[in-house]
Image (spheres, rainbow, N blue to C red):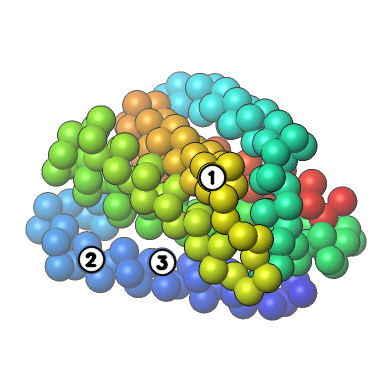
Amino acid sequence: MLLQELVDTTVQLAVGFVLAAAIWAVFGRKRAPFTQWVGLTRPSDGWLLPSAVILLGLGALSAVFIALGPLGDLATGPGTVGGKLQEQGFTPAMIGVIALGALIKTGFTEELIFRGLIAKRLINWLGFKTGNAIQAILFGAVHLVIFAVPGAPEPHVLTIATLFGLPALAGWCMGYANEKFGGGSIVPGWLIHAGGNFASYLHFAL
């Protein structure tokens, strides 16, 4: 499973970079270097503490929904990352699988696309409030794809609201952290995203 995760992570990372680089080459090459255009820059001083506070807050909120709401069942359903980790169980090699999946495959790649590519363009065009809100809505909407997975539970108001609302809130917070704490760097969002996913994946594997 570790080798397969390494291959999957490498492919997803490559696809993310190629997509971002292609769009930059068409729309941003004359405006800024690639790394600056997508936020692959050093964050501003003082970014770590407020970003960690957001990570802990979102983590606590997610834990409540996993324990008391439908999120736990949804996140470990057929075809989901959580479901696969739960089936495999915890082993020493699983730490590597979780780290690759949380830090790079989802954490970094999704930040590169959603906050580095999409959010930055929307914020530049529409201003921070509107642009960040739209990217958060898009990020939440993408998570509803889980209902299209074979064997997924029937969607209803509570599950849709949970599966859309929590990621949308997290997406908004990560965009806020990047722009307000990180000076446009996606590193704060990466920390929040990767840290939250790592804790969730570890919980599902145990």
Closer to the camera: disc 1 or disc 3?
Answer: 1
User: Label 2 is placed on what type of residue?
Assistant: Ile
Q: Is residue 25 above or below residue 104?
A: below
Relative to residue 99, is residue 191 drawn left or right?
left
**Mark 3 neighbour density, 10 Å: few (under 14) some (14–19) many (20 or more):** many
Residue 106 spot, x, y in % from top left: 55, 57
First in sequence: mark 2 or mark 3?
Answer: 3
Residue 51 spot, x, y in % from top left: 51, 28
- Judged from the image, the secondary structure of the residue bearing numbered disc 2 is helix
- Judged from the image, the secondary structure of the residue bearing numbered disc 1 is helix
Residue name at image x 46 percent, y 22 percent:
46
Relative to residue 48, is residue 71 drawn left or right?
right
User: Label 3 is placed on what type of residue?
Assistant: Gly
Residue at the disc numbered 2? 23
First in sequence: mark 1 or mark 3?
Answer: 3
Q: Is residue 127 above or below residue 35?
A: above
Residue at the disc numbered 3? 16
Q: Are marks 1 and 3 in contact (CB under 8 Å)?
A: no
Residue at the disc numbered 1? 157
Residue name at image x 40 percent, y 36 percent:
172
Q: Residue furthest left?
A: 30
Q: CA distance from mark 2 to mark 3?
A: 11 Å
